[in-house]
Structure formats: C-alpha cells, structure tokens
Image (cartoon, rainbow, N blue to C red):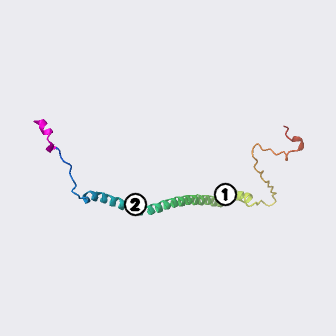
Amino acid sequence: MASARFLDPTSIPLKRQSGGNIWATLLPIIQGAIIVGVLSVVGLLFVPVLQTENRHKTELAKLQVEIADAQEQQHELQLKTELMKNDPNYVEHIARDILNMGRPGETILRFDPYPPVAPGSRSTASMPTGDAPSN
C-alpha cells in the first residue's frame, strides 16, 4: 500500500499561484533599492568631509616638519649664543673666519680654494710644455 500512496497524484503539491498580486513581489525589491539609494546618498555626503580631513592631515604633517626644523634652528642659535657669551676662542674664530678681522699688527694671508676638478680630467693647458703626456 505504500507504493499506492507514492503514485497518488493528490499527494504531489501543486505550484502556488500568485493570484495576480505583483506588489507582494515588488515590495521587497523596492525597499532594498530605497535602502541602497539612501546609503549611497549618505556616502556621497561624506566624500567632501573625508577629502577635507585628508587635506588637513597633509597640512598638519608639513607644519610638524616646519616646527621641527624651526626648533632645530633655535637650538643651534642658542648654542652659538652661549658659545659667544662664554668662549673667547669661538668669538676669535668668528671674527677671523667670518668677519675677516685680525689682531693689530697681524698680516692676514687668504688663499682662494681650488675649484673642484672631476677625477681623471687633466687639462694639458695648465702643464708646462715639457710635461705634456705622451700617447
């Protein structure tokens, strides 16, 4: 008898018909589209805020670098000031090398430094005629 129930067509569920109610099908799709649209609009409203925040962060980094440079320069100037106040040898060094001063009766000889020459480039114009390189 079990096989008779298996072959009985009344035991097979029939396809459920929607009954022409399309709104019952479209309502979840429309709700999902509205939610996605609202989230997109909210996201687009935050794009300028994020760009402004990014710009402020880069400006902050630049300003921090400038502050660090200014603090280093201030430290160097404080060190030079202390040396000028307390170290007479430093004052003499500044007077001689930067201000081109000397003691009374002292003869100062200054030599210009040689211009830098690339290695391996020898000029034959500056050599005497007897020292010219032979090929």
Quarter occupied by residue 101: bottom right
From the image, give the main secondary structure of the stretch colored magenta.
helix
Q: Position of residue 86 (x, y in %)?
A: 65, 59
Q: Which residue is mark 2?
A: 43
Q: Residues within 10 Å of mark 1 (few under 14, many from 20)?
A: few
- Viewer-closest of 85 and 67: 67
Of the residues under marks 1 and 2, which one precedes in the sequence?
Answer: 2
Q: Quarter holding the N terminus? A: top left
At a point 15% along the width and 43% down the height, the residue shown is 9
- Camera-nearest residue between 29 and 89: 29
Give the residue displayed 47% in from the left and 61% down from the top.
51
The magenta segment is 1-11
Q: Secondary structure at mark 1?
A: loop
Q: Nearer the viewer, mark 1 or mark 2?
A: 2
- The quarter of the picture where the C terminus appears is top right
Q: Residue at x 12, y 36 (%)?
A: 2
Residue 89 colored in magenta in the image: no
Looking at the image, residue 106 lies above or below residue 3: below
Q: Amino acid at mark 1?
A: Asp
Q: Quadrant of residue 32?
A: bottom left
> In the orientation shown, which residue stands out farthest toward the right?
130
Answer few, some or many: residues within 10 Å of disc 2's Cα (few below 14, many 20 plus, some between 14 and 19).
few
Indicate the position of residue 20 as horizontal and vertical percent values: 23, 58
Which circle marks residue 87 in the picture? 1
- Which residue type does callout 2 highlight? Gly
Q: Is residue 8 magenta?
A: yes
Q: Position of residue 70 (x, y in %)?
A: 58, 60
